[in-house]
Amino acid sequence: MLNTTSLSLDQAPPISIPFRFFLTAPLFAIAAGLQLLMFGGELFVSRWLPLTLGLTHLMTLGVLGMVMCGAMLQMLPVIAGSPVPRVVLVGTLTHVLLLLGTVLLETALVTGSAPATLAAVISLGVGFAVFIAATGVALWRTAAPSTTINGMKLAVIALAATVLMGIAAALGYSGAGRIEQLALLTDFHLGWGVLGWIGLLILSVSFQLVPMFQVTPEYPLWIRRYLPNSLFIGIVVWLLFQLGFIQSEWVDLSATLVLGLVVSGYLLFSLNTLRLQYQRKRRVPDVTLLFWRLGMAMLGCCALLWVSGKLFPPIGNSRYFSILLGIGLLQGVALSIVNGMLYKIVPFLCWFHLQNRQLALMCMTVRMPHMKEFVSDKSAQRQFHLHLTGLVFAAVAAVIPNWFSRPAAALFIVSNSMLLFNLLVAVRKYRSTLKLLLPTMPGTVSGSSTTA
């Protein structure tokens, strides 16, 4: 049984708001796979190549950004009890502007077009500004703050910093603005995006979603209370060291040690998540657990790889180090967890909205599907195995790109196509059940409104 006692379910936004984000994300993943299929091993030469940067932003903005923005618009009213103001308008504007901005940025990186870069910066900047302002209002007027809400606040601050750094870097690379030390600014943008926005949001919502959906014990109170703040402070201190605001004879070493503590914090989170999942009360196999366990295991592998690169320069200076670390973090950690979340959140939202409609109409003759009926375990497991195989091929492609890049791309395309198919099946099941309820509404015949 799901524990929903702490949720304000009556304040949830229309189901169309999160679903438009969730259904767009696999399309960008497929586009990323097609780009890799087209250019092959060229994309594994360096993370600084425009094509590689384009592929990276298709993943970070088009896939992860879409899912996380949609999830926050849905979860804030439910978890925090604080609705996002004008959520339909905010959701529509954010979705359209992020979609347009991601496409424009990909076009700018592939073609080198300065006008496309400027248009992408405007679209993404306005889209994220709308999202950050609206979610910020909802977060800061929460009546009863929790550890999850605190972590989400920090994630939104990190998102704002990531966006500002990204805009500055884009203007610098396009020649529209003069930016000193562009490479260092890009590293800041990457660090705040991965360790701040993506990492803190996943960590904070896990405090709520893992116990609720996976029927595990709660995370230890000290982790929930202190880990998000410690990670955020660590990222800030790392930035200050790199910018020279904190003076030290060993600036680089100090900055590396601070970043190492941040990495250690995420490793601690992954180990505790795996421990809680092992202690779960319900032993029924669940595909969501497979995705989460893979994501947590990959988080540990990425932490070990990063430490190895810092301790042994030949590893850190190798041409495949950055590419392999990026694949591990984006495809192995973030995308695995996002897949696991979608297979719980989407069926839950379908079931919840149908239950609400049924109770509002007092129509108990229509049978409500249970959550497992929206997405079958067998279909989700097939997609997990494709995702896992594609991840293995992508990791090998980082070292041997000419042989494995295109098979990795093909597997990635098929995996995300199956994810999209599974989500569409859930939406279709939702709509077909909703239609059975509509004719029972007073003054309607066969689903069409008439005057009583």
Image: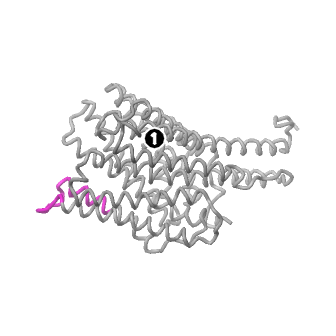
Residue beneath the point at 53% across and 64% down: 143
- The amino acid sitting under disc 1 is Ala
Residue beneath the point at 30% across and 57% down: 306
Which SS class for mark 1? Answer: helix
List the residue tagged with mark 1: 408
In this rendering, is residue 123 above or below 68? above
From the image, give the main secondary structure of the stretch colored magenta: helix
Quarter of the image that includes the C terminus: top right
102 sits to left or right of 356: left
Q: How is the image coloured?
A: one colour
177 sits to left or right of 250: right
Q: Give percent across and percent down for residue 180.
A: 18, 41
Question: Based on the displayed image, in which of its 4 quarters is residue 445 positioned?
Answer: top right
Q: Residues within 10 Å of mark 1 (few under 14, many from 20)?
A: many
Q: Which one is in front, 131 or 382?
A: 382
Q: Is residue 234 magenta?
A: yes
- Residue reaching furthest to the front: 403
Count numbered badges in the picture. 1
Magenta stretch: give its range: 233-252
